[in-house]
Image (cartoon, rainbow, N blue to C red):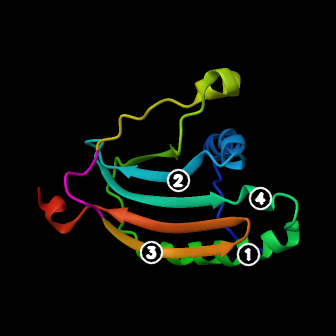
């Protein structure tokens, strides 16, 4: 794709990211996944910030869009990710993170088989006040519509 992106150097971290996204791929292709969220937590397991990838796949365009067209659209999107680093605050020591997916509808074990068992409901603590949203990038290139934004607690939530 000829786009410079950062990659995890630690083999276990790279494997976690790859296996998480690869496990979501069938559900993304079927249009079941609404958002993929990378959540950063403090030591108290309360989210500090969330990077949200909201996606929509147009099922009717499956064969009419070339790989080159999609690659071109994704290239512009990926370049913008380097800028998002400047809007995020440094994380405190002891912070951790996870990848979660918000499904439009839950995959059924009858239709999806053993793969549906890989995804479990999360026990992520929520903020009490509506979060503040910082838009980072959006892309509308059929068949893929993609938005990236950052959520962080409101100012009143941070003081609590």
Cα distance between the residues tagged 3 and 2: 15 Å
- Residue 46 or 123: which is nearer the viewer? 123
Residue 128 to residue 1: above or below: above
Instruction: Describe the element under mark 3 as helix, strand or loop.
Output: strand
Q: Nearer the viewer, mark 2 or mark 4?
A: 4
Residue 2 to residue 42: above or below: below
Instruction: Name the N-terminal-most of marks 2 and 4.
Output: 2
Does residue 36 appear left or right of residue 96 in this picture? right
Cα distance between the residues tagged 2 and 1: 19 Å
Q: Nearer the viewer, mark 3 or mark 4?
A: 4
Q: Which residue is mark 1?
A: 73
Residue 70, quarter of picture: bottom right
Tags 1 and 4 touching, CB below 8 Å = no
Mark 3 packing: few (<14 Cα in 10 Å), some, or many (20+)?
some
Which numbered tag is attached to residue 135?
3
User: x, y (%) of residue 6?
Assistant: 64, 65
User: x, y (%) of residue 40?
Assistant: 40, 52
Q: Residue at x 22, y 65 (%)?
A: 154
Mark 4 packing: few (<14 Cα in 10 Å), some, or many (20+)?
few
Magenta segment boundaries in residue numbering: 126-131
Instruction: Describe the element under mark 1 as helix, strand or loop.
Output: helix
Q: Which residue is mark 4?
A: 60
Tags 3 and 2 touching, CB below 8 Å = no
User: x, y (%) of residue 123?
Assistant: 36, 34
């Amino acid at each position: 794709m000829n786009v410079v992106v950062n990659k995890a150097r630690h083999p276990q971290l790279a494997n976690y990211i790859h296996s998480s996204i690869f496990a979501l791929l069938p559900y993304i292709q079927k249009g079941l996944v609404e958002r993929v969220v990378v959540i950063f937590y403090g030591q108290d397991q309360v989210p500090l910030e969330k990077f949200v990838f909201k996606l929509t796949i147009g099922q009717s365009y499956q064969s009419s869009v070339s790989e080159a067209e999609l690659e071109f659209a994704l290239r512009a999107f990926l370049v913008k990710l380097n800028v998002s680093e400047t809007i995020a605050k440094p994380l405190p020591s002891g912070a951790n993170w996870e990848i979660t997916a918000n499904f439009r509808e839950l995959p059924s074990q009858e239709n999806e088989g053993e793969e549906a068992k890989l995804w479990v409901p999360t026990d992520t603590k929520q903020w009490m006040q509506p979060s503040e949203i910082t838009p980072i990038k959006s892309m509308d290139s059929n068949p893929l519509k993609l938005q990236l934004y950052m959520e962080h607690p409101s100012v009143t939530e941070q003081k609590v």
